[in-house]
Amino acid sequence: MKQLFYFTAPWCVPCQSFSPIMDKISATIPVDKINIDYELDRARAANVMSVPTVVLAENGQEIKRSVGAKSYEQMLEFIK
């Protein structure tokens, strides 16, 4: 099963505009929203260097990642 891990932070300006897009994407694929301020260990384990970062995983294994805010259409293409 595919799943998205969305690494974000409340102080991140691009994340503020990107979060509604990820909320919309969550109707298509499960999204685990990870606030790096509270879950820094998870961000470190995933080698997240900046936010927003989205990791696409299948059966718990990373397939690919996207760094930076993207459009809804770009995210739909990313999860294909």
Image (spheres, grey):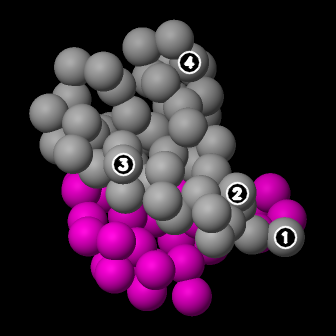
Q: Is residue 67 above or below residue 48?
A: below
On the image, the x and y values in percent for residue 45 come to 59, 34
Residue 51, percent from left and from top: 30, 40
Comparing labels 4 and 1, the label whose residue is closer to the camera: 1
Question: What amino acid type is highlighted by mark number 2?
Answer: Pro
Q: In which quarter of the image is residue 42?
A: top right
CA distance for labels 2 and 3 = 15 Å
Q: Magenta span covers which residues? A: 55-80
**Is residue 28 part of the magenta span, yes or no?**
no
Tags 4 and 1 touching, CB below 8 Å: no
Task: Please give the label number shown on residue 9.
Answer: none
User: In the rendered structure, which disc, 2 or 4, sits on the residue that comes first in sequence?
Assistant: 2
The first of marks 1 and 2 along the sequence is 1
- Numbered circle sitting on residue 30: 2
In the image as oriented, which residue stretches furthest toward the top? Answer: 38
Check disc 1 and give the amino acid type: Met
Please, what is the three-letter code of the amino acid marked with disc 4? Glu
Q: Which of marks 2 and 3 is nearer the N terminus?
A: 3
Structural distance between the alpha carbons of marks 4 and 1: 23 Å
Q: What element carries label 2?
A: loop
Q: Are marks 1 and 2 in contact (CB under 8 Å)?
A: yes
In the picture, the quarter occupied by the N terminus is bottom right
CA gap, disc 1 and disc 2: 9 Å
The earlier-in-sequence mark between 4 and 3 is 3
The residue labelled by disc 3 is 20
Q: In this view, does 42 lie above or below 75?
A: above
- Rendered view: 65 above or below 51: below
* Three-letter amino acid code of the residue under disc 3: Pro
- Within 10 Å of disc 2 (Cα), the crowding (few <14, some 14-19, many 20+) is some
